Amino acid sequence: MGEPCVGKTPVVVVTAVKWNSPVPYDPVWLASLQTYTPVPPVNETRLWAWVKEEDIQFKLFTRRNPYEYQLLKTNESTTLRESNFNFDNKVKVLAHGWLNHGDSPMPESIKEAYLNVSDINIIVVDWGTAANVNYILASYNVAMVGRLLTDFINFLIKEGVSADDLHLIGHSLGAHVVGIAGAYVRGGPIDTITGLDPALPLFTLGNKDARLDKHDARHVEVIHTCGGYLGFASPLGHIDFYPNGGTRQPGCGIDYRGLCAHNRAHMFFAESIISDVPFTAVRCTDYDELYYNGSCKGTGEKLIMGGFDIHYGKDGIYYLRTRAEKPYALGDVAP
């Protein structure tokens, strides 16, 4: 459709793709866009984003302040050091999705789960002002929010936080926010990114620089629960988990908009952190086995989805079943 430019420097190239909407007038299904160039830096991204820097808040929670956040700001060293941030502890960064905000169920449940089992730093990226708009505008805002998060992480690293202690977790559009952030961090790569049903609409054809990709961190895990509709079905990480096949989820009924299945990703993940019953998955031969059968017989290799520990070196496609209601984990059962 055109090339927004800064002088003669192209910022982004967008191509519209003909799209038949399954839900008329739903902005989620209005179009599919393709970006060909890397996400520009913040000073250029401002030209095509509908979000201001002050709209993004970085909220710190620890065991000393599990319910009342402390606001951190990029390049404000004194504020960071006078807060409850503990440089000896791991850092979990949580980014919500579309039409959500900092105290929505996704960041709240995961924050509470982590603080229940460990004394760590939880930073919630509250980009609610930019996320609570038309989906197309929100999808454009992802790049700006991602680059602002990059700047904040670079600040943490400059202050002494190790990239090895950083774990970014994002749901839906938030998965692409943390992916973009991880891709452009200096002093990285960061240790881990967990993508919870990364958003599909408007990112289907986008290049890997503008969405979550396995090169955005040393280790990238993805949980797919509404694949092919609201979330990506194709593998994006080093490890990709497909609960119940990764599309429809038991207990969600007809779910014609996909929201129930889409949200199961963060619900499964939050439960996995505190559950004594594991989400045990079996490794598929390849993605084709899952795609054509909707399940996998397994290769004999098993892996626990989610949980507190990171699963380095277990790359592959994994399938598991869950219950239809809480608690969702079934433990070590046959696929």
Image (cartoon, rainbow, N blue to C red):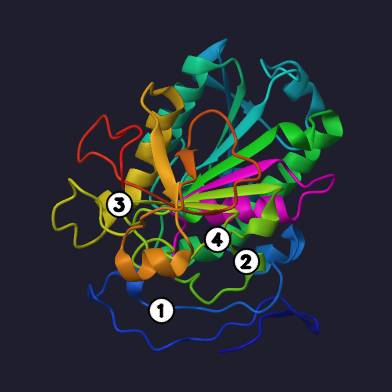
Give amino acid for label 4: Leu
Residue ID at (57%, 10%): 64
Q: Nearer the viewer, residue 131 or 301?
A: 301
Separation of residues labelled 1 and 4 (CA atoms): 21 Å
Q: Which residue is mark 4?
A: 236
**Do the residues bearing badges 3 and 4 touch, measured as CB atoms within 8 Å?**
no
> Nearer the observer, disc 1 or disc 4?
4
Q: Residues within 10 Å of mark 2 (few under 14, many from 20)?
A: many
> Nearer the observer, disc 3 or disc 2?
3
Q: Residues within 10 Å of mark 4 (few under 14, many from 20)?
A: many
Q: Which residue is mark 3?
A: 244
Question: Residue 159, relative to residue 177: is it above or below?
Answer: above
Most distant residue in the top direction? 64
Residue ID at (77%, 19%): 81
- Magenta stretch: give its range: 174-201
Instruction: Say which label, 3 or 2, has the lower sequence index.
Output: 2
Q: Residues within 10 Å of mark 3 (few under 14, many from 20)?
A: some
Q: Which residue is mark 1?
A: 31
Give amino acid for label 1: Ala
**Do the residues bearing badges 1 and 2 touch, measured as CB atoms within 8 Å?**
no
> Nearer the observer, disc 1 or disc 2?
2
Residue ID at (80%, 81%): 7
